[in-house]
Image (spheres, grey):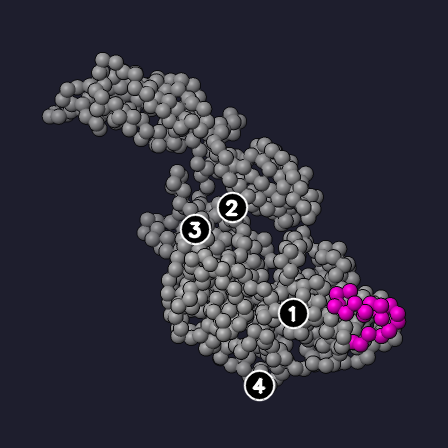
Amino acid sequence: MSLKGTNGRGKGPGRGSTDLRRADASAGMQADAPEKVRNIALVGHSGAGKTLLLEALLAATGVISRMGSIEDGNTVSDAEPSEIHQQRSVVLSVAPLLYDGIKVNLLDTPGYGDFTGELRAGLRAADAALFVVSALDDIDAATTALWAECDQLGVPRAVVISRLDHPRANFEATLAACQRAFGDSVVPAYLPVRTGTEITGLLGLLSGTVADYTDGDPVPAERGASPDELSESEAARGALIEGIISESEDETLMDRYLGGEEIDVDILVADLETAVARGSFFPVLATSATTGLGVAELLDMLTRAFPSPAERELPAATDLAGAPVGLTCDPAGPLAGEVVRTTIDPFLGRVCLVRVFSGTLREDSAVHVGGRGLSERGHEDHDSDERLTHLYSPVGASLKPVNSCVAGDICAIAKLANAETGDTISAKERPLLVESWDMPEPLMPVAVEAASRSDEDALAKSLGKVAAGDPTLRVERNAETHQLILWCMGEAHGEVVLDRLRDQGVKLQTVPVVTPLRETFAAPAAGHGRHVKQSGGHGQYAICDIEVEPLDRGAGFEFIDKTVGGVVPGQYIPSVEKGVRSQMQKGVSAGFPVVDIRVTLVGGKAHSVDSSDAAFQAAGALALREAAAAGRIQLLEPVSAVTISTPDEYVGPVMSDLSSRRGRLTGTTSAGGERTEVTAEVPDGELLRYAVQLRSLTAGTGRFRRSYLRHEPVPGNVAPAAANA
């Protein structure tokens, strides 16, 4: 429904219309100008109804013949096996529709915290955000935090209260919760109209008309509001008009309104649409994906009030030398697009979802693929020139061919050999780099190993493919424990990564993560190394005596020669040190490297014929082992400096939890916006699942970062096995 009433009704594709036939055809949708595109991310917590709302919008505009269901696993946007199994979105998905001559790219984002990377990619590709809030639930803290983040970025937003067909749905309570969480600029544009206890229509507060959905038709009947309905909505209408006027650039409107003048609806609607596009006013709509309630009104809002890509600021870009390049959303400008998602298709190979910021992507053109700044996550900087073979318009997992993609639009490219999520696609003759978006740091380790030696190559290849499409995944081969570690956002993210690897035929298993401990001597000790072997012919002869003493933490290793009289020939003294160092790397007690000791060579014996470099290396290693057996070995565990950002209300539980993890609190500081940063020193063994537990403690709003600080002695009441679990 148009905000002005019946104007604009039915302009979307209907059965048999030209637009609909184009939408249903094998060819994909493509826009010819940025002004005819809207890129809108559907955001909200898991279970709010984003995926079903997308289904309803696609069905109402004829993109699909009927809605799918989450239970049946046949929705457009949830096509991955893990999504069907878990019955929730885990990846970013795009589905376009045509309405009133406008192509709307709807980006369905996951609502679960583990998949924040996909959410951020969706916001990067979008020009506006549609917050979907369930009428059955309160506003969760993570959604509130996301709203504040969008507010800082100036992202235009609207709110949809969904699932109004449910018997427990409460529009008024949910609206009040939205206003508490999001602020006073969140104002309803429509109010539900009830027949008994059932919501059967929507009253347009500006138009004064009712969209009647009693017949279940996606295009509702129009009727004038009754006197009672107008009376009951008077306060809400006044609040809406005052909110619109306060955002208007016409400073005389408020005086005219307060003076009793009836402001023309066309003026109010125009000012409303301007304020929404500017990101300073946030209308609330009401919907039910099941009954179709409010879908027509939402389509009007998406196309009329949300901004086109031409109205939004583009990310910064540079050339390969680092010189800034000013970009505008111009189809004739320099080509600059960004890969916001990468998947591996068994038939098409690597498929990249690309938001085009400037220029026009065309079939059979040469492009430059460049990626920088993610080397710490295993994505080495890379540049390559490739040729595009086919462009597609993505409809969920389906790809429909198009021949071009203009600035502001979104498309998919298949068979790029080297492109990864976050890469820039630009012209071969003018390569550019778009500034990357903020990606969350994965902080939960999952250790995996191939089921057999023959599976190791398959695991390495598949990991490369999975990591190319997931910048929130970091792959590490730990040099000390030799474990293959997948750093994930949380348990759910880890499960999805493992499922993707197994879907590619990789046989693997998870194993406990081993914390890289150290060993050191807790007290001075002496060792005698005797390596004497006679087996006929040239033998081996080397004897050395050493003294070992501990050094301060971080002091490293010292080797001192105090032999006299040449009992150990000078050419073999470095051999003894080499043998000691070799044994230090292997460990002397639990198999962890030995650190922070001083070894003094005090005596030994050599043979004029049988002594050799190898013999004295063996004697040095044996002497250190003997000293360890006679002395007292102390295990050291790594300790990290941890900074936790949390809403003020969760500071107490966070600090208490850190204490239970043997953490030492070092301070708290205000981070602004009713958030606090807590700093502490925490053993690494206590942080293996902290990403999951912090989310639970803070209702999904807590974040933390960590950095290695030092190694410290493992307390006597903490078993090494526990530290390595």
Q: Range of the magenta residues?
A: 246-265
Closer to the observer: label 4 or label 1?
1
Mark 4 vs mark 3, foreground winner is 3
Q: Residue sitting at 74 percent across and 62 percent down?
A: 186
Residue 380 higher or lower than 102, as above or below:
above
Crowding near pointer 2: few (<14 within 10 Å), some, many (20+)? Answer: many
Answer yes or no: do the residues labelled 1 and 2 have beta carbons within 8 Å? no
The amino acid marked with disc number 4 is: Thr
Q: CA distance from mark 4 to mark 2?
A: 51 Å
Q: Earlier in the sequence, mark 1 or mark 2?
A: 1
In the rendered structure, are the residues bearing label 4 and label 3 in contact, judged by CB atoms less than 8 Å apart? Answer: no
In the image shown, does 339 or 514 lie closer to the viewer? 339
The answer to whether residue 287 shows anywhere in this view is no
Q: Left or right of 546: which side holds 322?
A: right
Q: Earlier in the sequence, mark 4 or mark 1?
A: 4
Residue that mark 1 sits on? 306
Give the residue displayed 62% in from the left and 46% down from the top. 702
Residue under label 3: 375
Describe residue 48's horizontal placement relative to residue 722 as left or right. right
Q: Position of residue 481 (x, y in %)?
A: 40, 39
| Mark with earlier residue (3, 1) | 1
Q: Which label sits on residue 18?
A: 4
- Look at mark 2 in the image and give the residue it sits on: 444
Rendering coords of residue 661 (x, y %): 57, 35
Question: Of marks 4 and 2, which one's residue comes earlier in the chain?
Answer: 4
How far is mark 4 from mark 1, CA to CA?
A: 25 Å
